[in-house]
Image: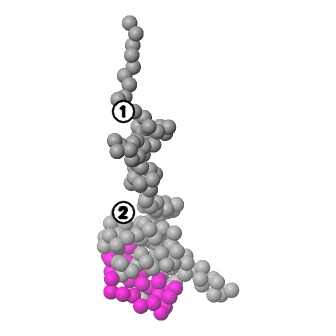
Amino acid sequence: MSRKTRQSLKPRQSGLPEAFGSLSLDGRQSLGRQSIGRQSTGRQSIYGRQSMTVKTIPKDPRPIRDKQWVSQGIKSLIASLVQLGYPNTLSPKQLQTPSQKEFFGIFKFLYSCLDPSHKFGERLEEELPFLLKSLKYPFAESINKSHLMSVASLQTWPVLLASLLWLVDLIMVFALIMVL
């Protein structure tokens, strides 16, 4: 008994493999590429390629989630603020879970060390990410408005502390350059 393979009733009119498009009944060729055994992860374009609009945020190499790093960072930040002449007194306990007002006060002070003529707007939570980007903070993309609305959260504070420590380092580098 011989086996016959079933043939498609639709005639192939193109030399291209079927995965690269097919002809419709009215003779026009489809531009979209059909999926071949895997799920599409991006948006399909009319040329058959997927457009990938995924934005990758660089990961901070510092161990910012480590409790010891956070407590050392807080001590370093307080020492630097005292050295720079920060007008308010801060304790390490206050900076374990700082308020939004305390964080914004520290940020304004540090930023004014870099640009004394800058006038802050009313909505610092919208302005701060832009200011960090303008200073070329490498991890500015990891800070957004929602982070600034919940400064003291366990997920947010280490990221914001790292940005303040970077500002302190930037101020110290500028101070060294000015001395030379």
Relative image position of residue 158 (x, y in whole percent): 41, 66
Q: Mark 2 points at which residue?
A: 155
User: Is 96 contained in the magenta span?
Assistant: yes
User: Is 99 contained in the magenta span?
Assistant: yes
- Left or right, 120 with respect to 61, comes to left
For the point 43% across and 59% down, the residue is 53
- Left or right, 170 with respect to 159, comes to right
Q: Mark 1 points at which residue?
A: 10
Extreme residue toward the front, this view: 26
The stretch of residues the image draws in magenta is 95-123
Please, what secondary structure does the residue beneath circle 2 have?
Answer: loop
For the point 50% across and 37% down, the residue is 15
- Cα separation between marks 2 and 1: 58 Å
- Left or right, 103 with respect to 112, comes to left
Relative image position of residue 83 (x, y in whole percent): 52, 84
Q: Quadrant of residue 177?
A: bottom right
The answer to whether 19 is drawn above or below residue 174 in the figure is above
Q: Is residue 76 visible?
A: no
The answer to whether 4 is drawn above or below residue 28 in the figure is above
